[in-house]
Amino acid sequence: MKRLGIGLLFFAWLYGVPFLLIAGLLRRTSSPYLATDAAARSFGATTDTLLVAALVFNLALPVAGLLLARLVGDRYWTHHFLWSLLGVALIYALFGMVGNGARAPLIGWTPADQQPAPRVTQCIPISGGRGCPGG
């Protein structure tokens, strides 16, 4: 059962981190058409969360797996996690190169005419008697 848990850590790093990085970078380089500024900011925040989580998991999972494999005394997974540290460095280097091409504003594109009109909370009368409902 111990080997299964350690193996799950390894495969979560091997497949999960690249998935999160690719999803985050695709979102980062896309230019979504969002109707409101709040939706665009939400899109940007989600994209940042994906990328930060991928970069944190990229280091945390192999280190945790290596420590766990050494604690249990499993030489097979210790060997795998030692080599995965090379993969960690490779992922950081690739992300650094690809990330330079993805330096765009992260709030998306919102056309000014699509923004909802601000809510009017008070009435300012206009000369001539028109402008305020009811007088």
Image: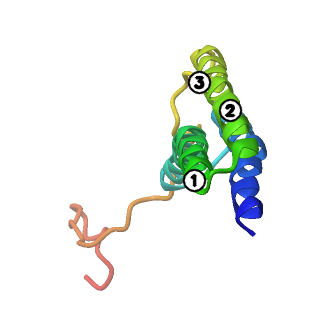
**Residue depicted at 65% across the width and 23% down the height:** 86
Q: In the rendered image, is residue 13 in sight?
A: no
Amino acid type at circle 3 is: Tyr
- Taking the image as shown, residue 38 lies to the left or right of residue 96, namely left
Quadrant of residue 47 in the image? top right
Q: Nearer the viewer, residue 94 or 126?
A: 94
Residue 64 place in picture, x, y as percent? 54, 49
Q: In the rendered image, is residue 75 in sight?
A: yes
Quadrant of residue 39 in the image? bottom right
In what element is the residue under mark 1? helix
Residue 53 place in picture, x, y as percent? 55, 47
Residue 60 place in picture, x, y as percent? 53, 45
Q: Are the residues flagged by discs 1 and 2 in contact, CB closer than 8 Å?
A: no
Q: Which residue is mark 2?
A: 84
Q: Quadrant of the C terminus?
A: bottom left
In what element is the residue under mark 2? helix
Q: Spatial distance from mark 3 to mark 2, Cα to Cα?
A: 12 Å
Q: Spatial distance from mark 1 to mark 2, Cα to Cα?
A: 14 Å
In what element is the residue under mark 3? helix
* Image mark count: 3
Q: Are the residues flagged by discs 3 and 1 in contact, CB closer than 8 Å?
A: no
- Per the rendering, the mark at residue 68 is 1
**Residue depicted at 55% across the width and 25% down the height:** 104
Amino acid type at circle 2 is: Ser
Amino acid type at circle 1 is: Leu
